[in-house]
Image (tube, rainbow, N blue to C red):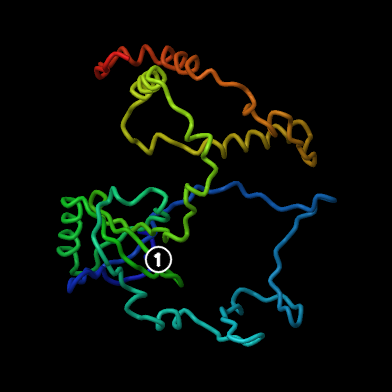
Amino acid sequence: MPRGLWKGAISFGLVNVPVELFSAEKRTSEIDLTMLDKRDFAPVGYKRYNKASGEDVPWGEIVKGYEYEDGKYVVLSDEDFRRANVEASRTVEILAFVDLKDIAPQYFETPYYLAPGKRGEKAYALLRDTLHKAGKAGVATVVIRTRQYLAALVPQDDVLLLNTLRYGDELRQAKDLDLDALKKIKTTTKELDLALRLVDDMAGKWEPEKYKDTYREDLLKRIEEKVKKGQTEEITQPDKEGREGKAGNVVDLMSLLRQSVEKKAPARQEKPRRKRRAA
């Protein structure tokens, strides 16, 4: 059983649903790399030190402080963060219910699970089933650790998922990009038909367990190759293709689409394809 971050409640209108917050994220372990000094390949370390005395400071002696005047601080403990707003620090406050499909993907940030608290199972199940049937998400505010987040409360199978959201001013707008050249491009009917055929051939069910992080294994193989060749302290320089890639090549899109469709032809024969109007 994972450790909960806090116990509190979901609040909307006069309803309070006791819940406990759990992280839904499980990061794949990264390869442990050590920073080295390029001149002699000696390890480079981090150092926490007292800027007044120059002495090292152990983690147990470090506290958080807010600088209210130059060189003067207010020391804050975890209890201070809680007391700043006791209700907000333990409450998922639903502000509105919106269509889940209306929340654009770029707003979603980090997922958490909300598990029902003691004697809260009935109200929890009712809220979950209501959101599922209505196709709605609860837009809420929630404090996690020392920051208040905007969040979306959505049903996911038997559980309620709390996904923190980015605020509008935290996102760059696509209109800020230089898209003048893109706006002038028009796809042809033949190109679109071939592309749709390829999408049909590659269509399948969403099965997240099928996808693995292969880059970690590839990087370990690269490390093993360098060890076998004795290149343990040799810095690999980028090659021409690595710097420039193939962006300069003219792409025959129709040819590539045709080859891709032909390569998938056996798979296409196994299942009927939806009818299309003749181009």
Amino acid type shown at disc 1: Tyr
For residue 258, which quarter of the picture? top left
Above/below status of 124 relative to 215: below
Q: Is residue 75 left or right of residue 145?
A: right
Position of 100 compared to 127: left or right? Answer: right
> Which residue is at the far right?
39
Q: Nearer the viewer, residue 74 or 46?
A: 74
Looking at this view, is 147 or 23 the one in front?
147
Number of callouts in the render?
A: 1
Q: Residues within 10 Å of mark 1 (few under 14, many from 20)?
A: some
Q: Position of residue 245 (x, y in %)?
A: 65, 30
23 or 92, which is in the foreground? 92
Which residue appears at 65% of the width and 75% of the height? 58
* Residue 226 vertical position relative to residue 178 in the rendered view, above or below: above
> Which quadrant of the structure image shows residue 196?
top left
In the picture, the quarter occupied by the N terminus is: bottom left
Residue drawn 55% across and 42% down? 178
Circle 1 — which element?
strand
Q: Which quadrant is home to the C terminus?
A: top left
Going 71% across and 68% down the picture, which residue do you hit?
A: 47
Is 235 drawn above or below residue 154 in the view shown? above
**Where residue 111 sits: x, y (%)?**
38, 55
Residue 192 screen position, x and y as percent: 38, 22
Work out whether residue 36 or residue 51 is closer to the camera in this orientation and state it.
Answer: 51
| Residue indicated by mark 1 | 149
